[in-house]
Amino acid sequence: MNATPARTFFNWSTGKDSALALYHLQRNADYRVECLLTSVNAVHDRVSMHGLRREFMLAQAEAIGLPLRTIELPEQPDMQLYENKMSEAVSSLKTDGFSHAAFGDIFLEALRRYREEKLATLGLKAVFPLWKRDTRDLMHEFIDLGFKAVVVCVNTDSLDASFAGRLLDESFLADLPAGVDPCGENGEFHTFCFGGPVFRHEIPFTLGEKVLREYPAPAGGGKKHSGFCFCDLI
């Protein structure tokens, strides 16, 4: 154990993996989480990853009791702009005395390597509290600990659009098709965590409309477009 806990900021996705990883990190005496960091689509005022309204992200930070910093991005930033913005934000955090960055990633090796390499160039270290744990076990733990989350985005190439708007519970797990990761680690679905042991109170919401959108598929995948169903929360 470190004599002094490492000052750590958490790369907050607003979803279940972030919430569970934060839960474990807050119980690790080697680290002291003091800040959340999230990228935002500044044009639509929503979380970049899955379209959650900014107000819900702010409500999470208030319920957790941690300050939130955002990376404000344009409508469709290219990778270079994204990396520049991220580097600016992380450099500012380092200047403020932070030495570690935490993530909710579970098993994507290339993503972990990318994060570690980028942080190393700035003199920071990465922390992965959930790394290599069984994803079905993680989902059962998430539910058993009393966390609550709702699906706000579904990749319809992997999962039927009807899963958007569903709560994460045992019936959700039972209904997942074979080949879909229980934590959606391959991008099959994204969630908004609205209650649980890291929150001082639950965050109220109402399910809004569902919107189906298509985006250019990643190169080399053999498909021209990928479909996503977003469930708005209001």
Image (cartoon, rainbow, N blue to C red):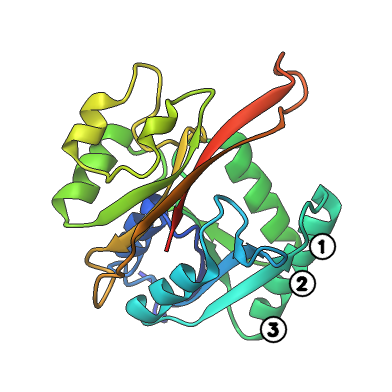
Residue contact between numbered discs 3 and 1, judged by CB atoms under 8 Å: no
Q: Residues within 10 Å of mark 2 (few under 14, many from 20)?
A: few
- Residue 95, how many percent across, how many down? 69, 83
Q: Residue at x 38, y 70 (%)?
A: 30
- Residue 125, how many percent across, how many down? 59, 62
Tell me the quarter of the picture where residue 85 sits. Answer: bottom right
**Relative to 154, is 142 above or below?**
below
- For mark 3, what is the residue? 95
Q: Amino acid at mark 2?
A: Glu
Residue contact between numbered discs 1 and 2, judged by CB atoms under 8 Å: yes
Tell me the quarter of the picture where residue 137 sits. Answer: top left
For this view, does 106 lie left or right of residue 166? right
- For mark 2, what is the residue? 88
Q: Which mark is residue 84?
A: 1
Q: Amino acid at mark 3?
A: Thr
Q: Residue at x 45, y 49 (%)?
A: 209
Q: Residues within 10 Å of mark 1 (few under 14, many from 20)?
A: few
Among the two numbered marks 3 and 1 on one chain, the one whose residue lies closer to the N terminus? 1
Q: Residues within 10 Å of mark 3 (few under 14, many from 20)?
A: few
Element class at badge 3: helix
Q: CA distance from mark 2 to mark 3?
A: 11 Å
Residue sitting nearer the eye, 193 or 121: 193
For this view, does 49 lie left or right of residue 90? left
